[in-house]
Amino acid sequence: MSNKHPTRLRSGPVDRAEPSESPDGRPNLLLPDRRAFLRQVAGIGGLVAGMAMPGLGRAAGFAEALGYDPGYPVDFPHFDYVNADAPREGSLTLSVFGTFDSLNPFVLKGLSAAGSNTLLFDTLVVRAWDEPFSVYGLIADRLELAEDGLSATFRINREARFVDGRPVTARDVVFSFETLVGEAAHPRYRYYWADVAGATEVDPLHVRFDFRRANPELHMIIGELPVFSRDALVNVDFAEQSRTPLPGSGPYVIEAINFGRDIRYRRRDDYWAKDLGVNRGQHNFRTLGFKYYKDETVALEAFKAGEFDVFHETNSKRWARAYHGKPFDEGRIRRREIPHDNNAGMQGFAMNTRRSLFADRRVRRALNLAFDFHWSNVHLFYGQYSRCDSYFANSELAARDIPEGAELDLLAPHRDRLPPELFEQAHVVPFAPTPEIQRQHLVQAQQLLAQAGWGLEDGKLRNADGEPFAFEIMLAQRGFERIVAPFAYNLRRLGIDVSYRTIDVALYQRRMNRFEFDMTVVSYGQSQSPGNELREMFGSESAHREGSRNYSGVDDPVVDAMIEAVIYAEDREALVTACRALDRVLMWNEYLVPNWYIGAHRLAWWNRFGYHDEPLPRYFSGAEWVMQTWWETHAEPQPGPVVNDVSSLNGGSPS
């Protein structure tokens, strides 16, 4: 199947996971994560008889993609990247970093269990992983968009059922929307759907969403809405509903729970959507389990001992050196780097600009100059990574050269609020291929710090009031300490009193929610077409709102203007232009010290599973791909040919 035509892909509200060495391989990829989708939304499913909706314009068919033809026909039997005839028995157990104390992934309070969103709840539409952005129907089987773009009406599939057998109705959809944008739910949903004025039950099978203003894709991203049972929750305190499973309409139910340690799900035999084309060849395991570990090195040893089945590696040193022994020699454990086309986004050491210490852009640039990525990549990462040089790394959305044309037109009205250099030269992430160049970087850093009012006194950096330049780097994984150490060494050479500390995951999440840190590692995953979620990451209104993902505290009207330009871009060309302008403003403001990325999912597994690899999907999470599309071939691991496809290690070794 060809995907030649560009389109817009959204990334919706997601639950945060502590970044690892690489943003593609975060240890908590199994945390509830609804990666949003939608540039063009589907009408969906076999069209059952229903009332005609007056005053409505274009109606989506089974699938629609603005700017290109959908990759699948109306009556498609299954996605190309699945095995429609896969066996539907057996079990799969995965690992998760951290802990959990909640079964409610939709509130700010607590740490929710892996799978408690994606396995239990269906949404109105789902996306294909092998197209830039096309969606197909699940709960909804039709979408109609008003000609003025100010409302959209979804029709509910008559067969949709909750786990208790009750039908899914428009009233449930309205209740779900109002719950998620209300005070009880995580505030990210209110921001993500801020332009949705409300939802109305037209009749039991039709729900209409009204919009505050025309948004090129708002009718599409609302399709991400997970649907709850109103009857089961209407008299429940949603914010405090954490230990009792929420009733959903998804393919699994919870079978066993040991809070903080493990959780197991059982596939529903009566799952209403198991025969839809969007689901055939998926959800192939009768039981799915997750075991929690607070140390990833311990988790790897547990994997090699057979405690769980698949390990998603996030550490370059372990990937290069820890995968050996009898099970590997016999082919009973296999490993492979699974390529993907995901937008790499940005990972970096984020500076909390709410702290006066990091308020000056010159200070932030100085800290950036102190990080020697080349040394770390050679000596710590076995040459496996590329440098993040953009908030949209590895995509056409990344800013390059100097602004011109339509991008310059976007930026020029804000010239007095932007660094003059932004208009004169391309932003360059510091790179030091030799020790001499890194020494030059430290000299430049010292000069910038002096310009910002910081001077050396007895080997310590102090301001005019004699206060030392001191801060802490907060971590959630001990494995990151070896990476931070050389960075901290260079900072100390500048006279900075820096320390780093690994804390408990629950405390870490609490402090992140409240922005109680100086510097930490953050990861901003991006899609092929960013949009509303950017307000949550970088918008001024989210800078001081507890629980937002604006970790650096970006509070800049220019950034806000560029975000709005992205959201309301009328076509792909305008979207790319706006993203590049936003990227340029963020990079020149030096809010973080960019890290690195890798264009593959590093997986190891016991040889008792099958998966469809011709073709592979293109835009996907490694964890969800395993959960949703793999199948069991044997009850016990089988010996066989050694599979050791690790191309990133070819020629890469520490020196």
Image (spheres, grey):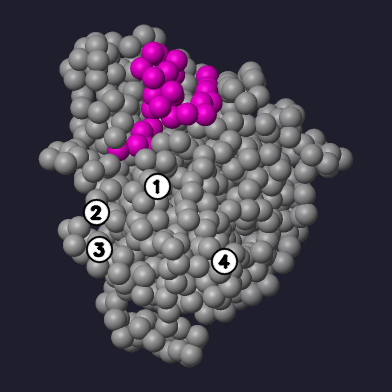
Q: Which numbered disc flags the more N-terminal residue, 4 or 3? A: 3
Residue nearest the viewer, comparing 286 with 264? 264
Q: Earlier in the sequence, mark 2 or mark 3?
A: 2
Separation (CA) of disc 4 from disc 3: 26 Å
Q: Which residue is mark 3?
A: 439
Front disc: 1 or 4: 4
Q: Do residues under tags 2 and 3 come within 8 Å of each other at their CB atoms? A: no
| Separation (CA) of disc 1 from disc 4 | 24 Å
Circle 4 is placed at which residue position? 467
Q: Amino acid at mark 2?
A: His
Q: Which residue is mark 2?
A: 374
Question: What kind of residue is marked 4?
Answer: Glu
Q: Amino acid at mark 1?
A: Val
Q: Which residue is mark 1?
A: 484
CB under 8 Å between callouts 1 and 4? no
Residue 526: image quadrant is: bottom left
